Image (spheres, helix red, strand yellow):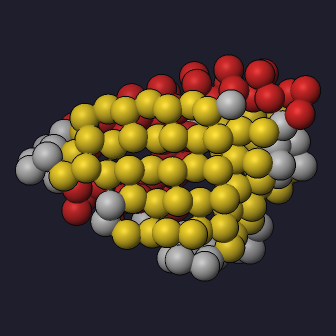
Amino acid sequence: MIVRRSSVFPAPREEVFTRLQRLETLQYIAAPYATFTPVEKNTGLSWKEGAVSSYRFRLFGLIPFGLHTIRIERFDKNGIQSREHNRHVPVWDHLIVLEDLGDKTKYTDEVEIHAGWKTVFIWLWAKAFYAHRQRKWIRLLQART
């Protein structure tokens, strides 16, 4: 199943791309739906093509959901393509598309999810999660001014 959501962010693409490279951004936009804690201490994001990183993932910051592994296939100013998984969701393929609109950015999350019989439940959670993430992105970018 696929979740797809787009929003227009009040910031230029370069700023959105720069913030995508920070662990703090991921942690802020995911909370409270999810928390990501790097497995290795003192590890920020090392997101570049070919990079693999793992995070302790908790639903709503409370429910352990195992290790979430992210493998970056593409990482550039136009977006990110990652192949992600954990023991509950063997396929979580995430595409972020950044479209330059001058002083704004069209941001799209597209996620393909395969989790066996759990897929529909994970998909419903993911729909709410990505709507939440994009609202938090907008708040984060509005607060900078």
At 39% from the left and 59% from the top, the residue drawn is 79
From where the camera sits, is residue 79 visible? yes
Q: Is residue 36 left or right of residue 98?
A: right
Viewer-closest of 86 and 28: 86
At 57% from the left and 22% from the top, the residue drawn is 128
- Taking the view exactly as shown, the residue that stands out farthest to the left is 102
Residue 98 percent location from the top left of the image: 31, 52
Viewer-closest of 116 and 20: 116
Q: Quadrant of the C terminus?
A: top left
Viewer-closest of 126 and 142: 126
Q: Quadrant of the N terminus?
A: top right
Residue 28 percent location from the top left of the image: 49, 45
Q: Quadrant of residue 33?
A: top right
At 89% from the left and 34% from the top, the residue drawn is 116
Q: Is residue 32 left or right of residue 92?
A: left
Residue 66 percent location from the top left of the image: 86, 50
Q: Is residue 49 left or right of residue 53?
A: left
Residue 78 percent location from the top left of the image: 32, 61
- Taking the view exactly as shown, the residue that stands out farthest to the front is 1
From where the camera sits, is residue 144 visible? no
Q: Quadrant of residue 117?
A: top right
Q: Is residue 110 left or right of residue 42?
A: left
